[in-house]
Amino acid sequence: MGNGIIQVFAENAYLIWLGLFIILIVIEIITVGLTTIWFSGGSLAAMLAALLGAGAPVQILVFLAVS
């Protein structure tokens, strides 16, 4: 059962990155400190990497590099 959950997350990683992007944008709108905007950009780039078929390690590296 555990392996199935991991597979579902791997197949829908772009949705996780999209959710993180939305949450970070909302936080940025509330705080207006330009702190989370960089992380939201990283999550957007990682979502693009996920849509292009990159694996989880590559997505995380893209997120960290862009953030």
Image (spheres, rainbow, N blue to C red):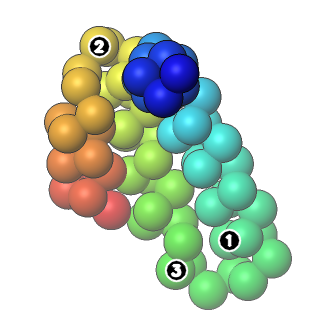
Kindly indicate whether the residue at mark 1 contacts the one at mark 3 (C-beta within 8 angstroms): yes
Q: Which mark is residue 28?
A: 1
Query: Label 2's element?
Result: loop
Image quadrant assignment for residue 62 = top left
> Disc 2 designates what residue?
53
Q: Is residue 13 visible?
A: no
Q: Where in the figure is residue 54, as x and y percent of width and height?
A: 24, 21
* Residue at (68% x, 71% y) in the render: 28
- Number of numbered discs on residues: 3
Q: Is residue 47 left or right of residue 28?
A: left
Alpha carbon distance from label 1 to label 2: 28 Å
User: Closer to the camera, 31 or 3?
Assistant: 3
**As displayed, is residue 48 above or below residue 28?**
above
Q: Which mark is residue 35?
A: 3
* Residue at (20% x, 39% y) in the render: 57
Q: Where in the figure is residue 34, as x and y percent of width and height?
A: 55, 78
